[in-house]
Image: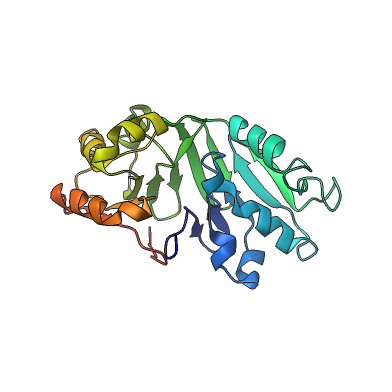
C-alpha cells in the first residue's frame, strides 16, 4: 500500500536487518555499502528485496554480501527463491568462488558476529522458522522481535540483557482480527499488552512496526488505549541511536 513498506532497518550504513523494502528506497550508492543482511525469517515480505538488490549490485562489488539466516530460513531462500526458476541463483553468480551473495547460517540461541555487532537469535512463535534478534553494539543493546505471536523464550532472554536501550516489537493486526493474528503468528494490541507484562525493563522505549496499513486508524486507537507512555509507532525514515 502506498506510503507503507515491509520491514527493513539499516544499521551503521553496513548492515540491513530484514529485506522487505530497502532496495526500493536506498540509492544505488548506499546499497553498495551494505556488507551484511540479517534475515529474521523467509516470508516474502522479509526477503523480497534481496532479489532486486543482488541483481543491481552484481559487477559493482569485489566482496560478497553475507546473508545471515537460520538453517530453515536459508533452506527456503536457496531452495524456493534463488533457485534459477523463481530467480537466478546469486549465491553462485557470477561464479561460485566469488558470488554476489554468500550464505552465513547461524545457530539459534548462540551468539554470532555481524560486522561489529554481537547478535543472538531467539526462536519466536510464527508458522515458519522465525527469529527475534538481540543485538549488542559498543554502546548498548536493542531487541527486534521479527514476526511473532505470544512467546516466552524471547522475553526470558531479554530479561537477562544489560544495557537494553530499545525494543522493536511487531504488532500487525487489530483486536477484531485476533483469531487471524493467532493463526498467523502475529500480535494485536491486546496480546501486546500481555507480552509487555513479561518484560522486566520498565523504562525502555518500545517502537512498534509491521502494522497492517489498511487498519492503521484502528490500530492507533487500540494502541493509544493501552496508555503505555513507552510505546510509539515507528515511521518510515525514523533514526535511532543505541
Quarter of the image that includes the N terminus: bottom left
Instruction: Determine if residue 227 is in view.
Output: no
Q: In the depicted view, which residue is nearer to us: 143 or 1? A: 1
Q: Quadrant of residue 59?
A: bottom right
Describe residue 98's horizontal placement relative to residue 41 as left or right. Answer: right
Describe residue 189's horizontal placement relative to residue 143 as left or right. Answer: left
Image location (x, y in percent) of residue 149: 35, 33
Q: Quadrant of residue 189?
A: top left
x 44%, y 31%: residue: 126
Describe residue 226's horizontal placement relative to residue 146 as left or right. Answer: left
x 62%, y 60%: residue: 34
Image location (x, y in percent) of residue 19: 56, 52
Please determine whether, in this image, residue 16 is positioned above or below residue 132. Answer: below
Q: In the depicted view, which residue is nearer to us: 105 or 45? A: 45
Quarter of the image that includes the C terminus: bottom left
Instruction: Determine if residue 113 is in view.
Output: yes
Colour pattern: rainbow
Q: How many marks?
A: 0
x 62%, y 31%: residue: 71
Please determine whether, in this image, residue 123 is positioned above or below residue 55. Answer: above
Image location (x, y in percent) of residue 161: 34, 39
Image location (x, y in percent) of residue 74: 64, 36
Please determine whether, in this image, residue 33 is positioned above or below residue 142. Answer: below
Amino acid at each position: 500500500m502506498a506510503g507503507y513498506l515491509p520491514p527493513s532497518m539499516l544499521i551503521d550504513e553496513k548492515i540491513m536487518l530484514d529485506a522487505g523494502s530497502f532496495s526500493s528506497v536506498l540509492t544505488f550508492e548506499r546499497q553498495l555499502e551494505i556488507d551484511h543482511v540479517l534475515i529474521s525469517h523467509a516470508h516474502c515480505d522479509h526477503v523480497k528485496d534481496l532479489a532486486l538488490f543482488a541483481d543491481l549490485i552484481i559487477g559493482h562489488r569485489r566482496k560478497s554480501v553475507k546473508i545471515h539466516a537460520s538453517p530453515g530460513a536459508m533452506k527456503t531462500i536457496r531452495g524456493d527463491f534463488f533457485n534459477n526458476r523463481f530467480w537466478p541463483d546469486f549465491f553462485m553468480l557470477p561464479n561460485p568462488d566469488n558470488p554476489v551473495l554468500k550464505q552465513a547460517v547461524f545457530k539459534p540461541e548462540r551468539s554470532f558476529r555481524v560486522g561489529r555487532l554481537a547478535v543472538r537469535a531467539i526462536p519466536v512463535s510464527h508458522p515458519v522458522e522465525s527469529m527475534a534478534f538481540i543485538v549488542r553494539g559498543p554502546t548498548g543493546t536493542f531487541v527486534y522481535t521479527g514476526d511473532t505471536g505470544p512467546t516466552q523464550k524471547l522475553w526470558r532472554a531479554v530479561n537477562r540483557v544489560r544495557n537494553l536501550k530499545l525494543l522493536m516489537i511487531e504488532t500487525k493486526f487489530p483486536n477484531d482480527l485476533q483469531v487471524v493474528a493467532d493463526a498467523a503468528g502475529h500480535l494485536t494490541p491486546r496480546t501486546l499488552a500481555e507480552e509487555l507484562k513479561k518484560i522486566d525493563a520498565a523504562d525502555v522505549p518500545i517502537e512498534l512496526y509491521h502494522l497492517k496499513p489498511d487498519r492503521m486508524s484502528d490500530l492507533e486507537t487500540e494502541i493509544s488505549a493501552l496508555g503505555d507512555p513507552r510505546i510509539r509507532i515507528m515511521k518510515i525514515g525514523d533514526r535511532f541511536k543505541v
